[in-house]
Image (cartoon, rainbow, N blue to C red):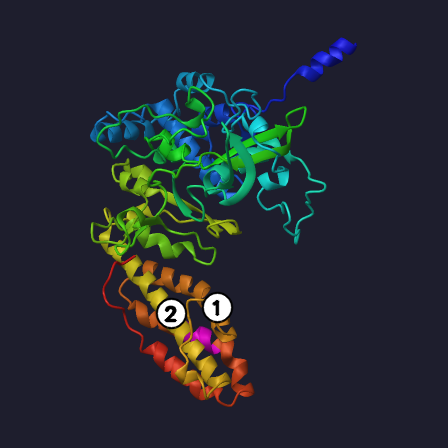
Amino acid sequence: MAAGRSRRHAIPASFCLATRLWIPVRSSTLHDSLGFRALFHHAHEIEDLALPIPPAESALWRLLAAITARITGLDDPDMPPSEWHQSRAALLTATKGFAPERIEAYFSAYVWDLFDTERPFLQDPALARQCRKAAGVNALALGRPAGNNLAWFSPHTDTHPRPVPSEQAAWHLLIHHQYGRSGQCSARTVDGVTHTSLRAGPLRGTVSFHPRGRTLYESLLLHVPPYQGSGQLEPDLCPWEEPGPPRALAPPARVTWPGRLLTGRSRHALLLVPSPDGNHVTDAHLTWATPHRGLPATDPYVIVQTDPTKPAEERDTPRRADADRATWRDLDALLLAGDETTTVRRPAIFDSLNDLPEPVWQRLTVRVHGFDQEPKTKNRAWYTASTPPIWAWAQEHNPDMAQRIAECRIAAETLAAALARALTRAWRETRTPNTTRAARPDHNKERRRPLWTRQAMADYWPHAEAVFWDLVSHKPDSPAYPAFARQAVDSLRKVTAPALAQHPGAGPALARAIATIRKTTAPRPKDPR
C-alpha cells in the first residue's frame, strides 16, 4: 500500500490546454468551456468567445490567430497576396470548418500542458532555480492586492493567499505576457547576471479592435493578418514551437510573421506552481524575460497614431485605452483607409477585409477590448464593447457614410471641448469673480476641472452618443454642429440649475457660456480622425 501511495504521489500535476476546459465560448443555445482541440474542431458551430476578462480574451485572440494561420496554411510568406486572399475567401465559404486532420497534427506536435516539467506552456522552467523567491499567486491574478499594497476591496492578502483555478491562471498568464507591468520584480540570476526590473508588455495600456464574423470559425480567419513584407529569411516560431526553453540573455529574435508578431513579444517570464492535482495554481514566479529592448513591431489590431514631430523610431504609437471614451468615437478611425498624410491609421487587420465574400463583410462587427493602465504599474480599468455591423460603411464601400461618421465625431468632440472651456470659465467667474479673467485654467487635467464641468461632461457624453447615431442613421443631411451644441447647452443648464438661486453672479456667467457654445464652429481642416 505504501508503494502504491508513493507511485500516486509521484504523478506530476497536469493541466493540458489542448484538452482541459478553460476557454469559455457561447452560441445561441449553449455556454460552455472548451480546450484548444475542441475549440478548433467546433469553431464553425460556435458564435464567439466568452472570456469574462477583456485583456485575457484580447491576448487569446492573438494566440488563436497564429494557430489558425498554421492549420490553414495562411502562414506562408511566399504566397502571393492575391492567392492568399483567394485562399482565405475559399476557407470562409467552407461550411464544415477547419480540416480535422490538420487540427490533430498541429496539436499533437507540441506541448500544451501548463505544468509540464520541461516545457510548461508559455513559461520558463528555469525560474525555479534562477529566482531567489516566488512572487506569490496574488501577483499572478490581476485585481488582487500583492506585496505591500492595501486590500481596499478584496479579501485576498499575502498572508493567506487563495489558490487560483488553473483555467483562470491560464487567462492571467496571457494577460501578463501582453499587458504586464514594468518596474521592480523578483531578482533573477542567469549565468551570473542578475536583474530586478521588468519591461512593460507590448500591449500595455492599449485598446484592441477585433473583427467578428457570424461564427467563431469566420472570426478566426478574419483575425489572420496577411504578410506585408518582401521576404522572410528566418523561420517564424511561436514560443511553444521553439526547439528549446527560452534563453534569457540571447538577443531578441526578429519579429517574424505571424507567430512572433502575435505571440512572441513578451517581456515577462513566468512559472506557475500547481497544486498536487493540477486543478489550482498555488504560487507563481514572475520576473524579467530578457534584458534587451524589444524590436519595433506594429500590432495588427491597434489604431496607430503618428506624431511627425518625434524621431522616426518614436513616431508611431498605439492608441491608448481610455475607460471614459466610448467606442463610437473610434468608428471613423476604423472605417477611413487613410493615406500618407494622415496622423491616424486604422488597425492593419482592417486593411485586409475588402476582398471578403459579401455575406461575410455585410455582417462583420467589431469587438473592442481595452485595458486602461498607467504605463508602469497601475491598472485603472478594463472594458469591452461591440459595434453593429459596420463594414458596409467603410470608405471602400460607402465613402459618404464614412465621412459623415467622421464629421459627427469631430463635431461631438469640438462641442465637448467648448462646453468644458465655457463652463470652467463660468465657474471661476461665479466663484472668484475678481481673479477669473486673469487666470487661465488647465483644461487638460480632469482632476482640476470644477464641479460644474465634471458634472456637465458626465451628462453630455451619453446624450451625445444618442445625437451621433440619430445624425448618422436618420438625419444624414442635418448639420452636426448645431445638434451637438443644443445637447451641450442642455447639459450645462441641467447641472447648473441649482446654482442660479445660490449664486447671484451665476446667471450672467452662464449666459455668456451658452452664447460661446452656440457660436462654436468647425475647427480648421485636419486629419479627420
Q: Position of residue 122 (x, y in %)?
A: 49, 29
The residues bearing labels 2 and 1 have C-alpha atoms spaced at a distance of 14 Å
The quadrant of the picture occupied by the N terminus is: top right
Q: Position of residue 164 (x, y in %)?
A: 64, 36
Residue 252 lies in quadrant: top left
Seen at 62% across and 45% down, the residue is 144
- Circle 1: is it few (<14), some (14-19), or many (20+) Cα within 10 Å? some
| Residue 29 in sight here | no
As shown in the figure, which amino acid type bears the numbered disc 2? Answer: Ala
First in residue order: circle 2 vs circle 1: 2
The magenta segment is 487-493
On the image, numbered disc 1 is attached to which residue?
A: 459
Q: Residue furthest right?
A: 1
As shown in the figure, which amino acid type bears the numbered disc 1? Answer: Asp
Q: Position of residue 448 (x, y in %)?
A: 49, 70
**Element at label 2:** helix
Seen at 46% across and 68% down, the residue is 457
